[in-house]
Image: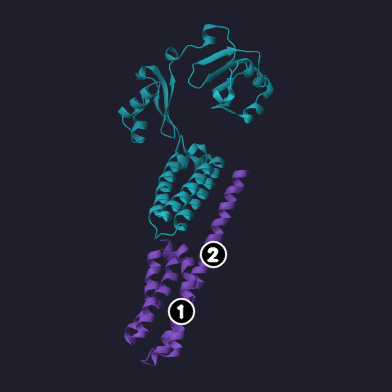
């Protein structure tokens, strides 16, 4: 009976961890994706990326990332997360030198990676096999 | 570096818990599915231990999942003999009255040398000594010798004998094992008085055992062991 309860506890821990992982990855990466989409929309009409609005949004994106990074590294491979981190850091540098092309390229990569990781990490038939 | 050490400690503790929950069978006679599990567990544990970029959870979660799978399989094998046979196989008679059953040996992917090796391990150097040999599901051979090669027992010789008794360790390496006193009917004070009578110091005792015939076996550190017949009797046995 003691063993049964120990195994039951392990099962409950596993179920809890799986749900937490699914929810966390989806929520956190969706945050990054939404913010990157906002930035893409905003930069589509203009070639000047040194506006207050864009700078604020990039700051927010960086803050959001810093807030989520530790938890995401607990769940996902650190190397995968590093790619996303590098692109987010690049945005600030591109604003300083007003590099529109590099800025939009980085935004597209961030958007793609955040979508892609959710797809890779989430539960699906393709991921199982 | 410190991260690696902490990760190793965590993984070690979890693997230890997993093995404890899997039961003692895991360490001794392993069934095929248990062997597979042990191999996977060993590999799973080492990857996140040495690779910092892999979250520790990627190692812990599969370990726990395998523990649950193992538990479920063990329960099903207990309930269903057919499932047990499917997972672990069934014992196969490799030697019978007609000699070696070569068909069975071939089916087990073994050769005659393997059978002889196992027989010698069991203490039989000739097939002629063996009536039956059974290859168990854990890969070991159990041998039933022919009557002429069976060891002679006291019953065979009609010798009167006293039943064997199990000695209980009461003191080990200078420490009194209180739990073992609970398993006997001998009072702790009685034993301690007896030890005083022998002018022994508990901290100097390497071992002190008592069986239900009142035989005490003790050894002091760096001294020779002694066996004494006493009136201390564990009547529980």
Residue B147: give x, y in percent of width and height.
45, 14
Figure check: B3 above or below A85: above
**Crowding at mark 2 (Cα within 10 Å: few <14, some 14-19, many 20+):** few
Q: Colour of chain A?
A: purple
- Of callouts 1 and 2, the N-terminal one: 2
Figure check: A40 above or below B213: below
Q: Is residue A113 visible?
A: yes
The chain that appears cyan in the image is: B
Q: Quadrant of the N terminus of chain B?
A: bottom left
Pick the residue in front: B224 or A62: B224
Q: Residue at x 46, y 72 (%)?
A: A66
**Crowding at mark 1 (Cα within 10 Å: few <14, some 14-19, many 20+):** many
Q: Element under label 1?
A: helix
Q: Which residue is mark 1?
A: A61
Pointer 1 and pointer 2: residues touching (CB < 8 Å)?
no
Q: Residue at x 51, y 68 (%)?
A: A24
Q: How is the image coloured?
A: by chain
Q: Residue at x 38, y 19 (%)?
A: B124
Q: Chain of mark 2?
A: A
Figure check: B17 above or below A106: above
Callout 1 and callout 2 share a chain: yes
- Total of numbered circles in the picture? 2
* Label number found at residue A20: 2
Q: Chain of mark 1?
A: A
Q: Element under label 2?
A: helix
Pick the residue in front: A120 or A66: A66
């Amino acid at each position: 009976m003691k063993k049964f309860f120990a195994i039951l506890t392990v099962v409950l821990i596993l179920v809890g961890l799986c749900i937490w992982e699914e929810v966390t990855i989806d929520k956190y990466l969706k945050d990054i994706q939404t913010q990157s989409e906002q930035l893409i929309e905003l930069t589509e009409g203009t070639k000047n990326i040194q506006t207050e609005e864009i700078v604020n949004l990039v700051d927010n994106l960086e803050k959001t990332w810093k807030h989520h990074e530790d938890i995401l590294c607990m769940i996902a491979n650190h190397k995968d997360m590093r790619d996303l981190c590098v692109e987010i850091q690049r945005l600030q540098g591109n604003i300083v030198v007003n590099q529109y092309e590099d800025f939009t390229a980085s935004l597209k990569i961030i958007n793609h990676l955040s979508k892609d990781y959710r797809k890779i990490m989430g539960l699906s038939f393709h991921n199982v096999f | 570096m410190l991260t690696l050490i902490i990760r190793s400690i965590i993984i070690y503790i979890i693997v230890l818990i997993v093995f404890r929950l899997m039961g003692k069978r895991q360490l001794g006679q392993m069934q095929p599915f248990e062997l597979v599990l042990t191999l996977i567990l060993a590999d799973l544990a080492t990857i996140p231990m040495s690779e910092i970029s892999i979250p520790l959870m990627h190692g812990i979660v599969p370990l726990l999942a395998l523990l649950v799978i193992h538990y479920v399989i063990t329960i099903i094998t207990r309930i269903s003999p057919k499932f047990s046979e499917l997972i672990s196989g069934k014992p196969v008679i490799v030697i019978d009255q007609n000699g070696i059953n070569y068909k069975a040996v071939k089916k087990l992917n073994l050769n005659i040398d393997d059978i002889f090796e196992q027989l010698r391990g069991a203490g039989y150097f000739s097939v002629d000594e063996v009536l039956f040999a059974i290859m168990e599901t854990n890969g070991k051979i159990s041998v039933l010798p022919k009557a002429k090669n069976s060891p002679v027992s006291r019953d065979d010789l009609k010798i009167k004998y006293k039943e064997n008794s199990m000695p209980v360790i009461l003191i080990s390496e200078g420490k009194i094992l209180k739990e073992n006193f609970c398993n006997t009917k001998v009072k702790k004070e009685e034993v301690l008085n007896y030890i005083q009578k022998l002018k022994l110091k508990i901290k100097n005792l390497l071992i002190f055992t008592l069986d239900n015939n009142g035989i005490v076996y003790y050894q002091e550190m760096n001294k020779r062991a002694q066996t004494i017949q006493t009136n201390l009797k564990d009547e529980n046995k």
